[in-house]
Amino acid sequence: VDPVPAVRAVALALHGSISGTAGTGSTTTTTTSFTNPSLLPSIYYNAVDILPSSVRSGDDSMACVCNGRVVVVAVGNAFYAVSGTNVPHGTWYTREEEGRSPMRGGVENAVSGVGFVDHGDDDDDDDDHDFNGEYLNKGHDFEKVLAFRQSSQVHPAIVVEIPISYRSEAELGGIGAGTGSSMDMEDEICTSLVFLASGRECGTVEILHNPRLYSNAGLLRSPNSSKDDPSDRMLKPSPSISCGSIVVGSPRHGIATLASPILAALGLQSTSTSRTGPLMAILTSDGLVHTRSPSCISIPLSTIEVGTRPNDYFTLRALPNNKAVAASYGGEARLISFKEDTVQDLADRMVKLAIDGLGSNGFPRSEFAEAVGATFSATSYVGPESNNAAKTVLRQYLEMILGLDVTGDFGGGDTNSYFFDEKYQGSGKDENGFHVGAASRSPHVSTYLSATALLCLVCTRLTPLNPTLANRAAKMCAGKLGVVSSITSSSINTHASDLCELVVQTLLMEAECKDSSNSTVSSRGTKSGIQIEMVEAATWLLRSCGKHGKAIDILQKRMTDPAIRNRTVGGGSSSEVSFAIGSPTSRRSRDGWSQLKFESFTATHLGELWSYGDDECRNIVLNSLATRRLLETNPMLGLNVFTASHPNNSEQWNDALSNADSFAPPGYTMKVVELLKSVHPRIPNDKRDKVVQINSPEYPSADTKLSLPLESGRALSATYLESLIGISSNRPQRIKSTSSVESSIHNELALLLLEGVLSERSDDKSDGDSELGSIYRSNLRRLLGWANAQVDPDTLMSALPTSFLRERALLLGQLGRHEDALRIFYEELKSLDLALEYCDARYEKQSAQKPLMKRSPSKVKQGIEDGSFGMDTGCAYLPLVAVVLECDGHTDQGIEAAIKVLSLRRENIDRAAALRLLPKTIPLSKLSSSFLVPALIDSESEGRRLTVVSSLLRAKYIRLKHKLTEAQIKSQSSLHRVPAFRSLNLDDPVYVSKSFKARPSNTTMPHFPDISLIKYFFPRYVIIQAMVTNSAAALEGKTLGDVQLIVAESSDEALLPSINVPIKTLSPNVVGSSWCALAASPQRLDGTAILACELRYRVLDIDTVTGAPLTFSGSFVSTGRSFVEEIQDVDIRRAEFMLDDL
């Protein structure tokens, strides 16, 4: 390399490798070897006097990161990152091409006969031009990465890129790491994790390279630009952009100082990337190799001694299969194999770190050791005196193994998989993302729970306190384990449960206010008052170990305790109560909980317990005072505890089980109803009238489904039952259950609604309803007219007052007495519209039964036999015509009403049967204009529409059948694509014969197709391919079906027919393959075997209009004439199975 001031260093090339590094002045230089001129580098560096001083020498003092787009170099005690520039197309030339180029000059990089032409003047860096004289910006960004406290010139500086699993921009919402596999995407954002070391200090930093940003311009580059062109900078500077194309993160958990100087390091990709992610192997001068995690570089995970003499082993290099080799100056070497950490290793390390950070007696040592199953050597460890630095190291390690590191487990590893195997990962989740107890049955769940409890305890011992981390850790643990009903139903041991309770006591003690009168600052650096995050962490921790009752009581006590409520910030009503750390009102939203947030938190917890389905969890919800208090203060939120698991629409109902018992097992439904009945919601008087007016019948919704105002226990019970049976969520029609439990649920709902109507009668009108009573009556009528209603008509009929005529008519309809119901509507209520509405509902019910019969015909048949499903097959409107004529006789009023029904519903009525019901004396003129003529026009229109639809469907059917035929022929075109041969486990054939013509044995038939045969020989099989061409002129373009080659007889028992694969459909002038497989025993074959073969096929009938076959079936019983043609015998020789003999 020519050591000129303007360094042109090739950073990356496809299949290229960096062969050396050097430091000259304030420049960086890399050398890349190329063995193939076509594999040219796509990035070069032109960094002129960009570094503050000389680059340190050494094999590891410089590294290309971010897929070669950034070079990190060591300068003194600091490290710097320099970005490269994409090489424009046509810049690299071979020597011959450069000699023919009109623009020669610049500095050559003579590497393997490949030259780099700089289109500019090296002597004038301010006047760089390209071929056309346009400005060519070199665009190198420069960023300081990290500086250590001391510069070690004796020991090497080390820059190592840690192997990570990249994530694309799409996975990170457009701002993330690229895949790193292709250099064609010039604007791809790349990220690297880099290990830096000098002397005894080391750290890991994250470097992101975004080529769309430029520090020298402060502008955002257009993503569509192919090179650095000033005209492409179309966007204005963004105030959020404070850096160039290189973004450097802060060191993870700071800088670590080791006991001995670092001589070498390498990055390791874990053998289980889903568990630990990448690791670092570090060689120190005392002959030890440490493995450490980039997320917690301060703690060695394992230590291996490779030498006993100081500064003897000096280098460490990676080998395949997660191995490394360390070499010494004395000529010795050590082969090192790295192993995965086990849960036992984690447990022992946690115990020792806890003793270092908290002291031997500063934490529940025995409970923690028993919970995690630590060994005796770990529990008997005597560490130094605890200090805040050791506590910080313990916190960092616990964050790493629990997956709580702010930067995450770089490389995509899931550290939680230390504790949970794959069968406990990603399965058993509910719709809210909870694992519903699957993770709690992992054999290592106690270790995971204990580590979380220990981290919460450490957060209370730090200075200052860290309640946010404790809350985040406990919440993540509860979300991972899901709903734990009890420790007996999980793998959590009693020691882990006891440990959690001890830690909870510590959290609550820290959360208590030391001085409620003011907000003085304590000696721990925290303000007095209630630390709500500590309280929340305690509740999450109790939920993780199955102590749900205690978790609920903790929050309830702090929300109902007058001493705490009096400490609310700024006073206010009960709905504004909040926990507060300090007295300023501005801190309330940040440091306290409002009443609504507390109620939402409690409702979510209770809802998860109820939806889990465990009897113990359900009893906690039913017997908890928190449930009753929530129903009283916020009825809607409290009711959602029991209804959250109910389907909300017809699609969810189709996916759910068909009976309500799946959402409330027998015995619990009535318990919930009794609980709701006993509740008296506390609705302020100024809001009560407003609630009723919004839901009054004067303001009905579009579907006239009015929701009850939740101002009484009756309304709560009715709303719960409506959600349970699905009347309020569009439950599809189904076969009615014969269970008496479900019938009792419907009866209970009907009686509740009836009770609501009767209790809300107006005082001024004896037969009138109040506004709230109208809502109850509307919901009662909706239930009685619902297709899935299972109300016992006899039970409710006896309870209905005589004035409830419409309700009585709906009950008669449930009994199938439609004419009696219509008489009430038409004769007693004097309303033809109500009668038509009843008939419309019946017609919709009949329409809903048709798809039900198609989906489950056997269940429908069984339901009809046992009486649980009543098939309504009669015309829905003819009974109304009969009732109208019967009530009004043959008067003009009755005839006009009957004709009106016929005209309004002529498309849904049996017209012939309707005409037979009408009096014979009725003039034809009365029927022609309103019924007969429109009905005739509708029939003709429907007939024409069906004709068009039939033609379209047939054309679509033929097109799809042709596509299917082509796909079948294609699937049988080659040997290894035939699905029927997959079970044979065929490898490459031993021998394949040449194609030869197959001729008929007798007189050639005019419609005999053209056939060519190929024989494939395998050690245990012989497969014959018959390539058939439908080209016989006598067929006149007809289609062949079921074309197959049949081996009728074999002269040797060593060859037996096994599988025949026919051509189901063969169109004219198309070539298809039929296959015949024979099981072979070559060692038993005597010389040559003769196979008597025949070709079977059918000539399909065709449609004279479309030319398509009338049938595409593959069976022999289909229509069409069948033919069987004998063909010449096929010879099979034993030598053809032996490749050497051939």
Image: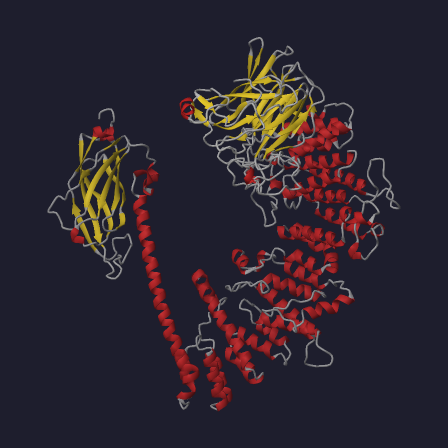
Q: Could you tell me how many numbered marks the image carries?
A: 0
| Residue for point 29% across, 54% down | 1113
| Residue for point 69% across, 57% down | 637
In the depicted view, which residue is nearer to us: 28 or 1135? 28
Specify whether residue 7 is in view: yes
Image spot of residue 178 (x, y percent): 54, 36
Q: Is residue 355 above or below residue 955?
A: above
Image spot of residue 1083 (x, y percent): 24, 28
Q: Residue furthest left?
A: 1003
In the depicted view, which residue is nearer to us: 427 or 581? 581
Q: Is residue 184 above or below residue 236?
A: above
Image spot of residue 326 (x, y percent): 57, 16
Image spot of residue 728 (x, y percent): 60, 64
Q: Quadrant of residue 306?
A: top right
Q: Residue furthest right?
A: 517
- In the figure, is residue 231 to the left or right of 462? left
Q: Is residue 205 above or below residue 573?
A: above
